Image (cartoon, rainbow, N blue to C red):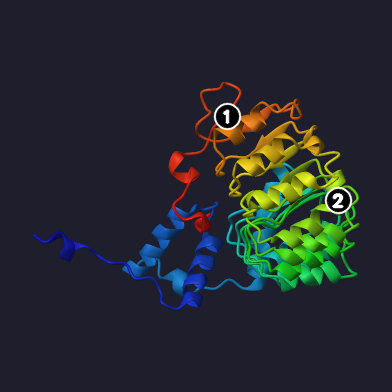
Amino acid sequence: MNKKNDMKILKFPSNIVQLEKQVEAILFAAEEPLDIESIQEKLMGIERGGNSEYEEYKPSFEEKTAKWEETLQSLLAEDPSLLKLSGKYIANDDVTIICNYHGLEKVRILDLADNQISDDALPVLFESENLAQIEELYLGINFLTGQGLTDVARSNQIKMKNLKTLVISDNRLTDSSVADLMRSENFPNLESLDIGWNEAGNETAKAIGETTSFPGLKKLEMERGYIDLEALKEMVQGSLMDQLEELDITANKLKDEGVVVLTSAPKWKSLKILKLSQNMFNDEGAKAVGECAAFAGLTQLYAGRNYFGNEGAQAIHESKVLKNLKTLVLKEGVEEDPGLVNYSRPELLRPDDPNSI
């Protein structure tokens, strides 16, 4: 018997709108939160001819509101300060319902990561009276592209003035929109900002160098950016560099020249944690790090998956400047020294194509 011929191939709707409606109906009808596997099983049931009620039924806004009120009441009963809604397939209309819910006054942490939120929802979130007290907002892994962030940055109706932590990483935010955020005066109490894994590049770097809008910012994460040498030079001259306690500039293709720019800047008075992994620098860059007097206050340094050899590694490990390091992550070749922590794999250390990093 030919097993291949016996296999049933499940075909999901070619129309993405139909698929979205089916998923929405499944989630609405569920008595408890569903994981991705459970949703897939129900979608397969639809294709086989079962659970056909999911295909036609679309809850009204009023029904969705009632369902959300029940869900929010249950979640907040457990911890009224935390509203964790990550990975719930939340779309823009759901955001509107959540923002209109009168029972959020004690919520300080709002986690909306890994959803289907797009630009139109951002002004709704940040201008909501019911969310004025939020201190931590997580919006990573959504469908944000830029216009919504620009609208928020330029708005004079922002209510979320107490925000201390903002994570907008892993979206598709444009360079200009992130730069608008860095120039905005809407978030004076921000202490931690993650803009990594977007399209932030030279305009953002220059805006960081110019901004005076974040007097309390202590942590800046900008992993996987697109910054050239001239923009980097402007960025590191900014007053913000003196107040940062943690900088994550992982995977920005700094190379030796970029690392030398970082180490030459007369800044870093408060810096404790520096993440320089995956930046394609060699021994010259490593030596510059080991000799940088401005890095004397570092307690954690991450420099794995770069191109330097033992000479560069020893320059950092045996540095007379970096005496306060408690955590040091380097590379293969020196892991026999108990003072070094290694988490890289040899095949990732020196890839055949450096441009692939």
Q: Position of residue 63 (x, y in %)?
A: 63, 68
**Quarter-of-image position of residue 41:** bottom left
State the residue at coordinates (66%, 32%): 316
Q: Which residue is mark 2?
A: 240
Q: Which residue is mark 1?
A: 341
- Mark 1 neighbour density, 10 Å: few (under 14) some (14–19) many (20 or more): some
- The amino acid beneath tag 2 is Leu
Q: Position of residue 322 (x, y in %)?
A: 74, 29
Q: Report the front residue among 44 and 110.
A: 110
Q: Report the front residue among 82 and 115.
A: 115
- The amino acid beneath tag 1 is Val
Mark pair 2, 1: CA separation: 30 Å
The disc, 2 or 1, on the residue closer to the chain's N-terminal end is: 2
- Mark 2 neighbour density, 10 Å: few (under 14) some (14–19) many (20 or more): many
Left or right: 158 as drawn, with respect to 171:
right
Quadrant position of the N terminus in the picture: bottom left
Point out the residue furthest to the top here: 338
Q: Report the front residue among 263 and 4.
A: 263
